[in-house]
Image: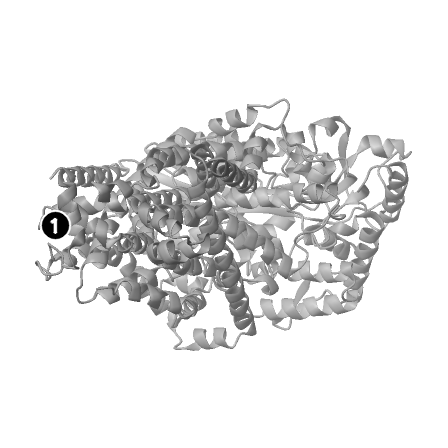
Amino acid sequence: MRYRVIAAVIAALALGVVVATTASASTKTTHTLTVWLQVDAQNGWPSVVAAANTAFENANSGWTVDVQYQTWGTHLQNFDATIAGNDTPDVIEMGNTEMTKYMAAGAFANITANKGQFPNSSHWLAGLAKSSMYQGKLYGVPYYAGSRLVTYRTDMFKKAGIKRSPRSLAAFKNDLARVKTKESRIKGFSPFYMAGTDWYSALSFVYDYGGSIAAYRNGKWVGTLSSKKSIAGLTAYKQFFNATSPKSARTLNEANPAPYTVFSQNRTSAIFGPGWFSCCTGAKYKSVTSQFVMPSHVAGKSMPGFLGGSDLAVPGQSSQQSQAREWIADFTNTTNEKALQAVGNIPNATNLLNNSVNDRAAQASWFVPTAKYWVNVENGNILRTMLSQILTGKLTVKQAASTADANIAYTLNQP
Amino acid sequence: MGFRVTRKLGWNAIGLAVFAVMAFPVFWMISTAFKSDDQINSFTPTWFPLHPTLAHFSNAIHQPNFGADVLNTLIVVPVAVVIAIVLAFLAAVALAKYRFKGRKLFIVAMIGVQMIPGIGLIIPLYVMLAHVPVLGIDLVGQLSGVIVVYVSAVLPFSVWTLRGFLLGIPKELEEAAMVDGSTRLGAFIRILLPLVAPGLVATSVFAFITSWNEYIFANLLLQRQGHQTITVWLSYFFGSQKATDWGALMAASTLIAIPVVIFFLLVQRRIAFGLTAGAVRG
Amino acid sequence: MGAAAEAVSKRPRQRPFNWRRTRRGTVPYLLIFPVVATLAAILGYPLYQLFRLAFERYGLPELIAHHGVYVGLANFSSVLHDSIFWHTLLRTVVFTVAAVGLTIVLGTLMALLLVRVSGWVRILITVSLVLVWAMPPVVAVQVWNWMTNVQNGVLNYILTELHIGDYFQHNWFETPFSQLAMVTTLIVWGALPFVAITVYAALSQVPHELIEAAEIDGARAWQVFKDVTLPVIQPVLLILTSLSILWDFGVFTQAYLLIGQAAIVPANYVMSVYLWEEAYFKTDYGRGAAISILMLASVAILSVFYVRRMLRVGEVD
């Protein structure tokens, strides 16, 4: 009898909680604008988000902005689920390499006619703007960008007698060799640290020599890594890597270990990666860390850096599209973009660029082929496999590039 | 007598060695939470931080929505576990003690359901919860939606496991406990409960931990900040493109493991060895 | 009280109360009804959808249009003709056998150990087991990464310091085999607590005086285990084995995160990673459904022996 009573009480409690949590459903007397931003905003520039929300809510009484933070690993699967369930957000942040697939499938609203509504839209960074367009129509608004730089130890370079940042790749190689002789006591030291399969960095060499990854010809995608220029770039990469980076890194990727971690362990004097790498180079070396733009093999020029970044799009399913566009305009206005710049991002328009090393790096940049299935090439690690084969010598540069070309073409030409 | 003591010492030594090996990664997690950033990344491992810092714990707690998300999880998980264990126990009694048509089918279904890769069910489940048929409510974004998913995730193996524990009760114990020849189902269950308590504990601990650490569905169904569970909160530490604050992540993980340990310590007394030994002697 | 109990236990196998006779019709159905209703309500529709999707082309455009295109067996055909599917299946079976074997054997040994140690050691071990168990998988993966890191991992450090060899900057993730070996150690380590604690709970149901009687009769430890302990814990062991097979066959988080998206290639796929990469990552839900069903069939075949044993154990009297 006692147990039955206890069981009944537990059941009632449980039921009560369930009902309570259901009943506390948001009684929407106001309108809500749902915005999906990546958690980078919450960690990095919460004041910018707050400013945009305030501006929007002041201009639209009775409206609240509900910002829901996403993580890069799961946000696309979650987006797919909301598409299926008919409750997509009104604004969504997409990585610039993620855009094409969704644009091609018709997930986003066509905002070509509204381009003028967005601040600085006539000066948008070419690389970002390209990622927001599909077949001539605009589907997204550039949000911010990031390029690639060399982060280095000023004290080690000074000790090696290097007075200024190298003007060419060959000069850089020599500089690194000089650092190496000076720091040979440190076990496991290597003047440059780069993960061998870090294609974001490696393919800069390809583009530096005028090569490319793929091209759209005669209605089909063709891999162009085995073109003469691309091969020259890949060969230059192999030589540079072998001369300056540790052998143990040949098959590693940039996630593990992170280059800045190796830097903070005093095991290298220079790394190549996004500008924000300087955040985590170790408290000990904060005062002796600086950055410069990676030099091209052509003296006096910069090597093009991979232009990463994000765009903001309005899902086609949203029934509040004009409000969504208004919020985006508030979020990407000049003040906010300058605030993003202040925390180490590259703003979305050329007229906002200053002379910081970060913004200078964006002057020469490259971007991935804007193909519908490009993400499948990335996720399939085709480029990483190629780089691993090249650096370990398993295949010659030409063989590895040809294999990659075939795989890329196969993947991109899927129906 | 001396031999016994030596044997005990021997077993204890092995036990401590097992403890050391199993607990090492946990120790690494906890000690990292107290290390400075430089010590975390140092080239030679830092075993014990000589100057432990509480900065990571402070950062962790001050991440947005920590308190709210802990509360949400403290609602979702115990409710799901209680519901699941109660339902599973009833079904397990039926499976272990009764013969009825469809019994085999039910058992096979319990194990069959677990063979389905969960990833395949994500989107259909979301679509269904967004517009629940018959009731017509929207459970997306509601804690009850997540509770409902966790109950169904945990039920099959709970039924399966509890059935095994019930089957394992030696006949003598059952018969001895039923001396008064009671015929009511309620009394029947009352007799079985203490005998199967260890199994209930083990199963409920598993249900608790599985629900506590579940991420995919919580992340999918709960989007509003402050209305999420603690695993989603944790994912924000490493979901950005920028560098992960490992110290804060380890501190956060240590903190959210505490309720689980407390729950276990509360129930582990029931798995006392020899619990049932006294019953037969009366 | 004692006399009555003795009288009862001395009676031949005739029970004072026959469970199976009274109201056999409705009681068991009432007992299983809540579970059946709950699972049917929550999983019914999604399962139906999963089976339907397997016969449709359902990519991103179809998702947006809320309408799939019927393609019959094309998804199944495409998967079954994919050599990667078969290689992955074989690799996953081998991986499952290794992981489950290690988990069950080591877990049972650990449970037997728990019985024999002093109370304080037992608490120490069980609390650490619960902490291991409670550790979020992503955190466990990261700790594993740190321990096995090329640059500064403790594993390399310890092995080199103990002069077992020169493991300076040794890469524990060099080949697909070593990658999967690392994944196996992580999974076995994470699975041991549940097995150890559950078997320990089952061991508590073994009548103590039976063990003592056997030991007095001169039986050795292994015989005691085989004749007295094993029959009592056998149902639980069978359950744990079959559950472990299911879980390890379908494991995703550790296999995916430990190797890392950047290093995942067909050569180190396990089935759920294959499902994720080849279907869901590419937004091909029809293919994903087909692979899910094939996975279900595969693991059913793999575990059928244990499931049948399980069913037969319950057939007693």
Residue A115 horizontal side relative to residue C225, left or right: right
* The C terminus of chain C, quarter of image: bottom left
Which percent across, then down, holds residue C73?
A: 41, 77
Residue C4 horizontal side relative to residue B103, left or right: left
The answer to which image quadrant residue A225 occupies is: bottom right
Which percent across, then down, holds residue A208?
A: 78, 54
Residue appearing at x 39%, y 41% in the figure: B212
Residue B111 horizontal side relative to residue B16, left or right: left
- The chain holding disc 1 is B
Q: At numbered mark 1, what does the secondary structure look like: helix, strand or loop?
A: helix
Residue appearing at x 56%, y 70% in the figure: C87
Look at the picture and state if A314 lies above or below A331: below
Residue appearing at x 20%, y 57% in the figure: B97
Q: Is residue A19 visible?
A: yes
The amino acid at mark 1 is Leu
Front-most of residues A243 and B24: B24
Look at the picture and state if B82 lies above or below A110: above
Front-most of residues A332 and A179: A179
* The N terminus of chain C, quarter of image: top left
Q: How is the image coloured?
A: one colour
Residue appearing at x 42%, y 60% in the figure: C246
Front-most of residues C93 and B43: C93
The answer to which image quadrant residue A205 occupies is: bottom right
Which percent across, then down, holds residue C127?
A: 44, 36
Front-most of residues C156 and A97: C156
Which percent across, then down, holds residue C22?
A: 8, 58
Look at the picture and state if A358 lies above or below A367: above
Write down the residue under mark 1: B185
The answer to which image quadrant residue C68 occupies is: bottom left
